[in-house]
Image (cartoon, rainbow, N blue to C red):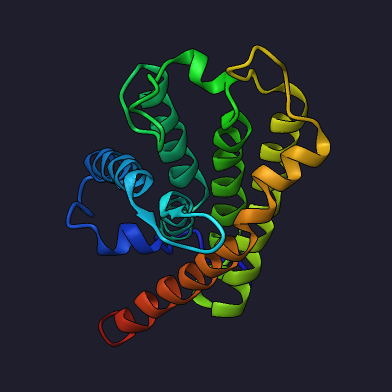
Amino acid sequence: MLSRASTQPALAQTLSPFAGNRTIQEVVLVLAGTALIAIAAKIKVPFYPVPMTLQTLAIMLIAASYGFRLGTVTVIAYLGEGLLGLPVFTNTPPEAASPLYFLGPTGGFLAGFVVLAMVVGYLADRGWDRSVVRLFIAVLAGQAFLFALGFAWLAWFAQLSSGATGLGVEKAFVAGVTPFIWAGLLKAALAAFLVPAAWSLLKPTNG
């Protein structure tokens, strides 16, 4: 079965201690999710050829365990925190979080976070969060949109510190895509393993 029954909660809702009050449950999950993404954005892991953060891994896990609606809302709320000036992004500080930050080199990737959450969450709602293979495919599909938006913005629209607009196609691909392909595959594999594994642990108690 690819579609989840309408009464079947997402993984995060199943684990939440606030199941009796949906409003409180969702507010807590959104706040916890934005905090997790912000913390993950600050964690840099040495990885060839460039260090990687755990930010996109956090978004993958949230989308897969929250589902389409709540996962998307959480990522939008995270971006809203940055829009309001909270230092939740990888480069803040030293850069200042503000509306202008979204016009910089990472603006396309920030928008891509929402699409990543939408794609993974949509497929998770249809049962792909229970299968390692299907969730891996879902995350790869979401990352494809993330990289496409990030690349396009960096190539043609990003406002650079030099005053130029965009790096151009070749430089944008080398700087914004190539160094992160292997890291993206690793994160996809981790997310695809962790969420179905959590569901498997719940089987004895949930029947």
Q: Is residue 207 visible from the viewing direction of this image?
A: no
Residue 173, given in percent of the width and then of the height, sits at 75, 45
Nearest the eye: 103 or 62: 103
Looking at the rendered structure, the number of numbered marks drawn on it comes to: 0
Q: Is residue 179 left or right of residue 99?
A: right
Residue 90, given in percent of the width and then of the height, sits at 40, 38
Nearest the eye: 50 or 181: 50
Residue 160, given in percent of the width and then of the height, sits at 62, 20
Q: Residue furthest right?
A: 169
Report the residue at 56% width, 39% height from top.
114
Report the residue at 63% width, 55% height from top.
179
Q: Quadrant of the C terminus?
A: bottom left
- When the figure is inspected, residue 102 is found, relative to residue 126, above or below; the finding is above
- When the figure is inspected, residue 164 is found, relative to residue 190, above or below; the finding is above
- When the figure is inspected, residue 93 is found, relative to residue 114, above or below; the finding is above
- When the figure is inspected, residue 157 is found, relative to residue 57, above or below; the finding is above
Q: Quadrant of the N terminus?
A: bottom right
| Residue 143, picture quadrant | bottom right
Residue 22, given in percent of the width and then of the height, sits at 28, 44
Nearest the eye: 12 or 41: 41
Q: In this view, does 175 lie to the left or right of 197?
A: right
Report the residue at 42% width, 70% height from top.
195
| Residue 151, picture quadrant | top right
Report the residue at 55% width, 66% height from top.
188
Q: Is residue 13 visible from the viewing direction of this image?
A: yes
Q: Is residue 130 left or right of residue 177?
A: left
Q: Residue furthest left?
A: 17
Q: Is residue 192 left or right of residue 62?
A: right
